[in-house]
Amino acid sequence: MSDLRELYQEVIFDHNRNPRNFGRPAKVDRHSEGHNPLCGDRLTLYITFDQAGKIAQASFEGQGCAISTASASLMTEALKGKTEAEAEVMFHNFHGVIMGTSDVDPAALGKLQVLTGVKEFPARVKCATLAWHTLQAALHGDQQVSTE
Amino acid sequence: MNQPLKHLPLRAYDIESIRADFPILHTRMHDRPLVYLDNAATCQKPAVTIAAEKHYYEALNANIHRGVHLLSQQATDAYEASREAVRALMNAPSTQDIIFTRGATEGINLVAQSWGRSTLKPGDEILVTHMEHHSNIVPWQLLCEQTGAVLKVVPIDDDGVLDLSTLDQLLTERTKLFGMVHVSNALGTVNPVAELIRRAHAVGALALVDGAQAIAHTAVDVQALDCDFYVFSAHKLYGPTGVGVLYGRHSLLEKMPPWQGGGDMISLVRFTGSRWNHLPYKFEAGTPNIAGGVALLSAIEYVNALGYDAIAAHEADLLDYATSQAEAFDGLRIVGKAPGKVSILSFVMDGVHPHDIGTILDMEGVAIRTGHHCAMPVMERYGIPATARASFALYNTRAEVDALFAALTKVVKLFRG
């Protein structure tokens, strides 16, 4: 089970059981709905900006597997206080590391590093990236995105 | 190997010798013996079928229905012997009524585009059931967009049984075709197709049966069923991928226009107009998957040698054994509890998404399907995004069912701590 423990780290179970920032806030500036048709996962991401243009709150709702739920939960935590440009960089760093297409040091991902075990499970990469594609769609003003 | 179908004496159901016939069952996944329980997606192939495909390329390869040379004649004979084997398997009246396709999906699309597009008018209705595979939904939706016809749906109950209480309202003289799945790939339900076909004919509608999931588990007699169309895929009958069968009632096939145009489907081509070939070739444009078509015969022989009765009894025992373990498993809920269902155990577990179940089982060597099984309306009906599905075939064992539940125990351990 050592490989499985790489994928299912304790932090992932924690965020799956108790997702942070779960639910729709009263005030929403941007939102987008992400869908992974292969496994039926759906999530809606809500973003609220403060007056300085930084993300005051990111939250989500929906249903998905442990990987997609934990990824969304960790992402919403990490987005707080970031500008749009910083959020874009976060997307590219995360996506690049998970897909193995960038030479960004995984350590730069901080807490999100627990999700990098997914690299060894190609069938699960889309689970980890669903929330992030939804983030990018929300930032770009697209209200729907699909991983297929 | 290009001989006509052999009628061999029934073979004893010796599971060890049967398993020895399937090379892939002896491979390992993640350093564990493969426990293949994804048979509803595709069945594994016996060595004789793999050998038949190899033999075709080594000894018979030529294009069919056109060459003057001996090799082409031998390839044609082998391909046509397979068509006769399919005819006999389904008890169709004639090989002219057996159209080779790429799969069950293509067969349904052929009927929709040839019969449907030339026949339907705005306001006509197509009826399907709520438990159809996408392949028996989407071709009709496309047809409805093209013709102005309307798609209607027979509901299902909580156990996964068709709710026929409203069938009289749904099946009317406006209904031109009733498309029904013989065995549900998501639920395992066996539908009362003979009765539904009779009801369809009573209002003047045609009946199409999607037998993709039935053909490996139950004998099919298209004349006894009295269906107008029956489709299946060879790869779900232990045969090659990329080969399918459409049986059609002869009088309908005669009237239907060609669907795809090209070589082989014509008798005469002039720029002023062309004439179509006779059946079944009118519907077989272009060079088909000859090797796969030829090898299908050996898969049919393999199944015949064991016999559908023995296969069904073996699989029923496995499903009963798995179902009783599932019912006793804490936090597991079976999706689809139709009486008399075959081969399929679809389920969900408290607090664990099916996709996570699938990954953890895979690490134990247990291959199952997780997801919507190309039946999103079924998932929606039960308010779930997906299920985990174990599906059994003629070569599975009780020990493999035990391996499935041992792996599910590991899922629980990992997720619930």
Image (cartoon, coloured by chain):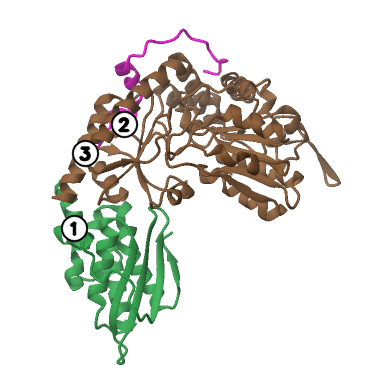
Circle number at residue A13: 1
Range drawn in magenta: B1-29
Look at the numbered discs 3 and 1 and tell me whether their residues touch, using CB distance below 8 Å.
no
Residue that sits furthest to the right in the current view: B272
Mark-to-mark CA distance, 3 and 1 = 19 Å
In the rendered structure, the residue with mark 1 lies on which chain?
A
Q: Is residue A139 magenta?
A: no
What residue do we see at 18% from left, 58% from top? A13
What chain is colored brown? B
Residue picked out by circle 3: B407
Q: Secondary structure at mark 3?
A: helix
Inspect this view and state whether residue B306 appears: yes
Counting the numbered discs, the total is 3
Look at the numbered discs 2 and 1 and tell me whether their residues touch, using CB distance below 8 Å.
no
Inspect this view and state whether residue B102 appears: no
Chain A tint as drawn: green
Circle number at residue B323: 2
In front here: B63 or A53? A53
Q: Is residue B287 left or right of residue B363?
A: right
Mark-to-mark CA distance, 2 and 3 = 16 Å
Where A136 falls versus B395 (above or below)?
below
Few, some or many residues within 10 Å of mark 2 (<14, 14–19, 20+) = some
Q: Earlier in the sequence, mark 2 or mark 3?
A: 2
Quarter residue B244 falls in: top right
In the rendered structure, the residue with mark 2 lies on which chain?
B
